Amino acid sequence: MALTIKQQNSFFNVEGNINSSTVKQFKNHLEFLILYTKSLTINIDNVKEIDKDGMKAFHYLFAKALNYKKKFEIIGYGCKDIYEDIQYNHAA
């Protein structure tokens, strides 16, 4: 399934799969948004799959946002699992 990222007000809605075939597009697009926005909130309600490459991308983007002192939020179904994974891996 193709990956689409659409802006709606101050949120970016992600639809599709974040996996090995779409992760490069996902990471590049969100990295650009981190650099050129004050904060970034992405809604993953319409994401059907996140594989290990997708999770690595979330870790990378979270670290990138921290480096640039930007607010980075993930909202929607499954966001708690992503935050827990990021927190666990950054604590280790």
Image: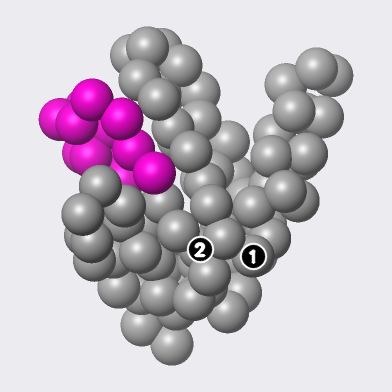
Number of numbered discs on residues? 2
Q: Which residue is mark 2?
A: 44
Q: Considering depth in this image, is 42 or 92 the residue closer to the camera?
A: 42
Can the viewer see residue 76?
Answer: yes
**Residue 67, above or below 82:** above
What residue span does the magenta drawing correspond to? 30-41
Q: Position of residue 10 (x, y in %)?
A: 25, 47
Secondary structure under tag 2 reads strand
Q: Quadrant of residue 50?
A: bottom right
As measured in the structure, the alpha-carbon distance from the residue carrying label 2 to the one carrying label 1 is 7 Å
Q: Which residue is mark 1?
A: 77
Give the class, few, some or many, for how many residues have Cα within 10 Å of label 2's Cα (few <14, many ≥20): many
* Residue with the most extreme left position: 36
Position of 11 with respect to 43 (left or right) is left
x 75%, y 28%: residue: 87
Position of 77 with respect to 33 (left or right) is right
The answer to if 89 sits in the magenta stretch is no
Q: Position of residue 77 (x, y in %)?
A: 64, 65
- Residue type at mark 1? Tyr
Q: Considering depth in this image, is 1 or 48 the residue closer to the camera?
A: 48
**Residue 52, above or below 27:** below
The answer to if 31 sits in the magenta stretch is yes
Q: Position of residue 4 (x, y in %)?
A: 30, 73
- Residue type at mark 2? Ile
Question: Is mark 2 in CB contact (under 8 Å) with mark 1?
Answer: yes
Quadrant for the N terminus in the image: bottom left
Check residue 87 in the rendering and tell me which mark sits there, or answer none.
none
Q: Quadrant of residue 78?
A: bottom right
* Residue with the most extreme front position: 9
The mark that comes first in sequence, 2 or 1, is: 2
Position of 92 with respect to 40 (left or right) is right
